[in-house]
Image (cartoon, rainbow, N blue to C red):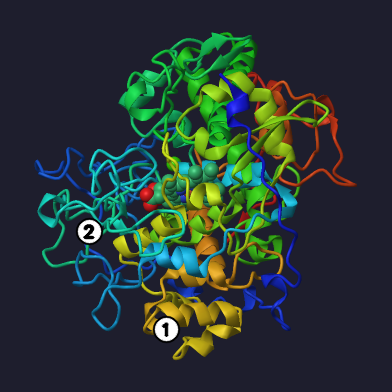
Amino acid sequence: INLGQASYSIIHDSHPTGGVGNYFSKPFNYGKTRGYAGFYGQSYTQSNPFGFTAGTGSSLTTKTCGVAPTSCSRSRYRTFSGVCNNLHNPGWGMAAGSYSRLLSPKYGDGIHSPTLSVTGQELPNARLISLNVFGERDIPDPKFTLLNMQWGQIMTHDMSLQFGGSQAFKHATACCSEQGDLLEQGDLHDTCYPIIIPPNDPVHNNFNRQLCMNFVRTLTDQDVRCPNVQFGAPSEQLTEVTSFMDLSLVYSNSEQMNAQLRAFTGGRMITEQRHGREWPPQNPNASTVCTMSSPTEVCYLAGDARVNQNPGLTSLQIMLLTEHNLIADNLASINPHWDDERIFQETRRILIAEYQHISYYEWLPIFLGQKNMRNNGLIYETTPGSYVNDYDAGIDPRVINSFATAAFRYFHTQIEGRLDLLSEHRARTASLRLSDWLNRPVVVEAEFDNLCRGMVTQPEEDTDDNYDTEIKHFLFRLDGTFGQDLKAIDIQRNRDHGLASYNDFREFCGLKRASTFEDFMDLIQPQHVERLRAHYTSPEDVDLTVGGSLEAHVAGALAGPTFLCILTEQFFRTRVGDRFFYENGNIDNAFTREQLQSIRTQTAARFVCDNTNIQYIQPRAFERIHLGNELLPCASLPRIDFSLWKEDVTPAFDTHNAFIYTK
Ligand code: HEM
Ligand SMILES: [Ca+2]
């Protein structure tokens, strides 16, 4: 490959003085005003989202609702589809089930059509809001690395994939012509909701034409005619993946798909050996899922269909895959009597634990704040080897629509459009332009270690109201000059899913409901409020994904109070509603105290070290290298001690005497 062609340099703007975070005189104490704490475990008004039987030949799609069994047997291991994690509600969190909601939807027609203004008119154009309300300044984050952003996308892909409508691939349904012109009304598919390019768009030449960006609506329980959906009830979007943090992106969401990924020997996953290391297998549908300049280019197959989407994501997926095989080889050598299935399942359990640990104790505190997480029971100060027995079968672990469709997407602001390739001495050898390498993983194989060093060294973009030009004007441009706009897509998706308004969520989160635009100034800078006023007719119309992305951050967190409320709620449910959560000592095959303690020593840094040829890394890999976080030899970082899984080690843990955390 010709990297020269792809190199790209950006001149960084200087950091603005007095950023959004400094706007408040009084810091907002999120923990104290948690007005929404009362609803855990309550049931929601929506119609039965589970227990679907297969859909009935919808004309829209071949996709069908997930089928949850009516009863479950107690398995030692998670199912691939997520069913039976909750023994009373077997469908909770399963793949092909629905999202949950914190607030009832606000569809235009009350049931299914995209949200409208309170005046009954269309909401302001999504691309216009993206252009005029949000910036595109390139401000490197002073503290965090690109790994911080990239790990978040891994968690996203584990937790959510909107059914049928994602813009992450070239969509089979076209709402705009090849040249980008809006199709005639009669030619538009039912699921089309194209983003119209406004007049005077700075990059798309709209002269004498009605241009658009493709946008296909997410399929709902009504679209695929799930049984038990009540006539006239509001539509609920479906998700393709399990809600649990169970590494479904590695192992897939069904047994059949998993069988295509497993080697069925030594507990291993299928890999292909090239250039002295293991790579994921080739995707049999390479030409449809990847952008390839030759038919022999690599295009990977993994548990998640988005694996090839961008080089950083693909690199982390590869690391998760090789970490699986590394653990499997360790277990196989210490337990030669274990068969393939046993090694595979125990390995899967350890890898998920390792990843849940890094996500909850190393990554999430950066985003949600350590104190906030402690106050709300998302993490605990544990004594060595102690369990946290906070599993609650009454908590619905499903992913919340406003989490996946608005709050978690805020971190698209952290995406960097230039990826540096670095030597072991952290010298830059070249840079990649992100939009040259979307759905095109060939570069990952050619530059794996250099890319990974870039990811753990380069700063991510500041978490603010700016979105990198590579995703704002060039997303999925393929060979074209310009492409799509991820912020505009996020706004359009917010309306597609009929999310309740920003103002509704403020109230829900215990904040003051605004009656005028000025009332937003408690959390949003005046110049941003003015831009909202210039575009929206009423404060009631402001989209959640827009208002939430403009709020000043809560001290110690990377989001404002409204998004923080949704994020905190989600990660509480994801933990407490997961029967197999790694710290839980009350399940049939809980880790022993020693095993749990060893898992708790694992860090993102060591994980990266063990799955790349990187020799030196800073111990806190989500943070940039600085005094106190200098490069150290990989071997000096703690590593999980797999000998603790040797079967003749009797568990020393006594449930009755141990210090147990309970809710
Ligand atoms: C280079 C990095 C990334 C790219 C190119 C990217 C691109 C995309 C695209 C194209 C979609 C589908 C939009 C739609 O059709 O509605 C999407 C969805 C999403 N993204 Fe990202 N993203 C990136 C990183 C991230 C990060 C860092 C996070 C959070 C930490 C994130 C969170 C989400 C979420 C929650 C969704 C919705 C997923 C679903 O429910 O289907 N993304 N992203
Ligand atoms: Ca999952």
Badge 1: how crowded within 10 Å, few (<14), some, or many (20+)?
many
Query: Can the viewer see residue 270 in this picture?
Result: yes
Marks 1 and 2 close (CB-CB < 8 Å)? no
Q: Which of 257 and 3 is in front in this view?
A: 3
Q: From the top left corner, tell me how far across and down residue 206 is, in percent.
A: 34, 57
Query: Above or below — where is 260 with respect to 515?
Result: above
Query: Can the viewer see residue 244 in this picture?
Result: no
Q: Which of 530 and 309 is in front in this view?
A: 530
Q: Name the residue under label 1.
A: 539
> What is the three-letter code of the residue carrying label 1?
Pro
> What is the three-letter code of the residue carrying label 2?
Asn
Q: Distance between the residues labelled 1 and 2?
A: 33 Å
Label 1: which secondary element: helix
Q: Which residue lies furthest to the right in this view?
A: 627
Q: Which of marks 1 and 2 is nearer the N terminus?
A: 2
The residue under the point 41% across, 16% down is: 294
State which quarter of the image contains the C terminus.
bottom right
Say whether residue 195 is left or right of residue 19. Answer: left
Q: From the top left corner, tell me how far across and down residue 234 is, in percent.
A: 21, 66
State which quarter of the image contains the N terminus.
top right
Query: Above or below — where is 231 with respect to 649?
Result: below
Q: Mark 2 points at which residue?
A: 48
